[in-house]
């Protein structure tokens, strides 16, 4: 089997000249995946370098296609924040190219093996880490995701079918052309990375149901996109979506003035640094004996533009200090705000904080405490993707946890939990070596 | 939080006296899961021992309920093989009890941690292995699965909701009563193991869509059940179902008379030992230069009652040796027979065997060869859950691979691949420990 069996030559007509069904993309991706899964790391690194070089060399073409997307979206009335996410400039494109190079420097998990164990039957058994195969990634209007996901997929030996937002069709087509040329230049199948160029929702549905050809669907976007995938896919989906973040402030972390200052900084960092992130603070849980630290925190948050929604006890403590806040309703707890809003809940005990988190948490939960036994119990009891002691919830991030790069953040428990790096794009297979053994 | 908050006292009315919605079961399971996830291993072991003791002490009641199920099923015209799978006797029940004790001796994966790594920000990061939470297991008419799955779920710290076949309602109710009494006797929440007693299909659908309360659905049964789950579930499903098994016989394994005898034994073991198993042979791939070994193998298989469906080259080789076989059609390849039937396909080269497996394989594939480089290439290229060199495909089994026990066999790539033991019923969470760090 040579690579050329699985790809067209550079002279062949470009795929986008022909209507190609999503099923055909899947078949092509599966053929490409067979080549990718045995590639040495050095070949994958070379491919990523070729893509980075191609992005720089074709910057003019890519930015021109992107400008057309931006203009069309502006004319269609896309809101300014979405236009900003869609827009590329020379600096952003350089950032994308150097991110591809950064992915090429990550350790390659493919090929790792567990120690062989001889079983009573005499056969020797080990597992070997292998790529998942074919990924389907569905995302919204940011064209950088196209390249970012392609790089992570290739480095982990996977083929990928990308379905971006309809506003980015021209940008993604230009990026796909550059990636294809780079892959062909490295004698690799161009079908390793394919973009669904038809923005119709039916095409996305076809991808979600391609379970004989696609091994995993990874949505990147809001809770609505994740829900749509879960409800319609027959391919296994790695869901993210809603992530509620709590910070519990224990009285033991408010006695020392330095701790008090740290608590204020952590809460500010949690809420203000990037309010649109899934690991930003949603609900501050405060022990009733720590309420004297709340006015300082609330004043600081309000100074940073945060709207606070408080329960009666917190409201009273803040009123007494001359601070006005909104009254929280039930809907303000267990809610991901993704904005400069936070709810505050007073709890009469640490155990009540645990119960509250058990009812509302799943993503990232922080305890601020000087009581080590309490911290251990928090880590033990809280069943969230990340449990954090005495630091900001914003550390629940692939880069910050040492993964190097992340393709998505999982809020489910199967397969991957929290940030997904290269390793989470792989699986294992069993290898059994015998000498004629049969089963008794 | 004491255990008694989460369970009713032994004096309370039994749950089966009341109609309980599947959602209510889910809520109860989630509360129980919170207790289970922090249980020390010794407490889980004690619970399993109490269940085994309860099964033995209540054998009379269980067998009486089972006899009612068998009688009702016989009157309803259930075929004999299904009646056999449904029927329990004293010996089978003792086997079930000692299997529970065997599970209690397996290593507990919960609580394992990875080494803490200090990140550039200063926070220390590790992961900790934790139970999945709440499992939903859907199976057919074998009541032993009820106890088997309950034991594996408890030992891995999970709560489980069981939905067995409608023919086993009385058996499962009796088993659930015994399990509940054992759990209460150990001061554990009875809701850790719950059986959906209403056999209506709507209840199963409710379970499949309970994604806010159930962490994973594990179907155990035929391809139809798996398909039903995949198409209807919003809870992540671990699919098994169709598993096609190939054995490739290379000429290098037919030159030595001892190898020839080994090949015959492996093929016989692969097909005849347990034809209904998912790891039984479906298609024998034979190199055209190994065809002289085929008559001996075919004669042996036919003597064991196997029907062979052969391609023209194999058919001719066998005819010349006076052996009659059926002609294979395309549908005989990539088909799981689950019966004493196998297809034979002649390939002109090893590469063609790899291509054939790439098109039709996914479960267990065997190579019989004396060429080490070829064996390595087979292990590298074949993308199946288990790749086996010079041994029977029947070794793709939890017990044989050293897992101790298996809850199901996954044919998908996400989360678990191949036999699933206790470890595959767990996930990880991130633990971050800091000293006031915030994200820059």
Image (tube, coloured by chain):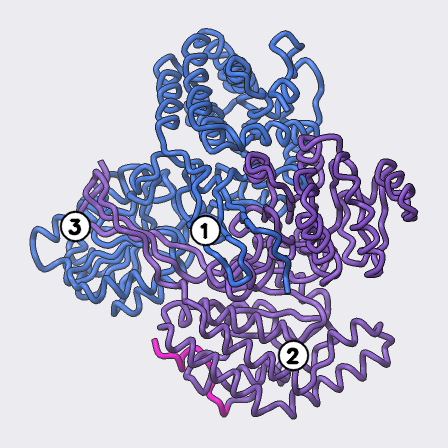
Chain colours: A blue, B purple
Query: Which secondary structure type mostly characterizes the magenta part of the structure?
Result: loop
Task: Check the image and name the residue furthest to the left.
Answer: A257
Q: Determine the secondary structure under disc 3.
A: strand
Please name the residue that numbered disc 3 is placed on: B435
Q: Are marks 2 and 1 in contact (CB under 8 Å)?
A: no
Near mark 2 (Cα within 10 A), the count class, few <14, some 14-19 or many ≥20, is many
For the question of whether residue B307 can be seen, the reply is yes
Secondary-structure class at tag 1: loop
Residue appearing at x 57%, y 36% in the figure:
A133
Depth order, front residue of B258/A307: B258
Of the pair A168 and B224, the residue shown nearer to us: B224
Q: Alpha-carbon neighbours of circle 3 within 10 Å: few (<14), some, or many (≥20)?
A: some
The label nearer to you, 2 versus 1, is: 1
Above/below status of B2 relative to A184: below
Which label number is shown at residue A22? none
On what subunit does the disc labeled 1 rest? A
Q: Circles 3 and 2: CB distance less than 8 Å?
A: no
Q: Is residue B157 visible?
A: no
Measure how far apart labels 2 and 1 are at the Cα level.
Answer: 40 Å
Q: Which region shows up in magenta?
A: B1-11
Chain ID, mark 2: B
Residues under labels 3 and 2: Cα distance? 52 Å
- The residue that disc 2 covers is B172
Q: Quadrant of the N terminus of chain B?
A: bottom left
In magenta stretch: residue A166: no
Q: Nearer the viewer, residue A56 or A186?
A: A186
- Local secondary structure at mark 2: helix
Question: Cα distance, mark 3 to mark 1?
Answer: 41 Å
Residue A34 falls left or right of residue A116: right
């Amino acid at each position: 089997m040579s690579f050329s069996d699985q790809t067209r030559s550079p002279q062949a007509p470009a795929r986008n000249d022909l209507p190609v069904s999503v099923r055909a993309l899947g078949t092509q991706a599966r053929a490409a995946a067979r080549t990718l899964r045995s590639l040495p790391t050095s070949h994958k690194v070379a491919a990523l370098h070729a893509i980075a070089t191609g992005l720089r060399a074709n910057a003019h073409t890519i930015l021109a296609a992107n400008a057309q997307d931006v203009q069309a979206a502006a004319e269609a009335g896309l809101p300014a924040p979405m236009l900003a996410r869609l827009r590329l400039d020379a600096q952003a494109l350089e950032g994308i190219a150097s991110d591809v190079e950064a992915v090429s420097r990550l350790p390659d998990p493919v090929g790792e093996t567990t120690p062989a164990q001889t079983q009573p039957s005499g056969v020797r058994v080990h597992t070997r880490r292998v790529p998942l195969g074919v990924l389907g990634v569905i995302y919204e209007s940011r064209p950088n995701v196209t390249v970012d996901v392609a790089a992570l997929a290739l480095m982990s030996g996977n083929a990928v079918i990308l379905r971006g937002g309809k506003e980015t069709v021209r940008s993604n087509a230009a990026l796909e052309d550059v990636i294809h040329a780079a892959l062909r230049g490295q004698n690799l199948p161009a079908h390793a990375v394919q973009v669904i160029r038809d923005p119709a929702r039916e095409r996305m549905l076809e991808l979600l149901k391609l379970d004989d050809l696609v091994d995993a669907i990874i949505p990147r976007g809001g809770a609505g996109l994740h829900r749509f995938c879960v409800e319609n896919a027959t391919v296994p989906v790695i869901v993210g979506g809603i992530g509620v973040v709590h910070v519990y402030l224990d009285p033991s972390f408010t006695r020392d003035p330095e701790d008090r200052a740290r608590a204020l900084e952590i809460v500010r960092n949690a809420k203000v640094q990037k309010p649109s992130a899934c690991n930003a603070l949603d609900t501050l849980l405060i022990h009733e004996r720590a309420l004297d630290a709340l006015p300082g925190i609330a004043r600081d948050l309000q100074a940073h533009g945060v709207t606070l929604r408080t329960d009666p006890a917190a409201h009273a403590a803040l009123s007494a200090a001359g601070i006005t806040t909104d009254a929280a309703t039930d809907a303000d707890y267990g809610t991901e705000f993704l904005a400069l809003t936070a709810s505050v809940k007073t709890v009469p005990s640490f155990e009540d904080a645990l119960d509250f988190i058990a009812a509302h948490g799943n993503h990232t939960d922080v305890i601020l405490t000087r009581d080590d036994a309490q911290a251990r119990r928090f880590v033990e009891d809280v069943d969230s993707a990340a449990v954090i002691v005495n630091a900001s919830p914003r550390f629940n991030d692939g880069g910050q946890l040492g993964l190097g790069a992340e393709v998505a953040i999982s809020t489910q428990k199967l397969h991957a939990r929290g940030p997904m790096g290269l390793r989470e794009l792989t699986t294992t297979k069993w290898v059994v070596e015998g000498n004629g053994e049969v089963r008794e």
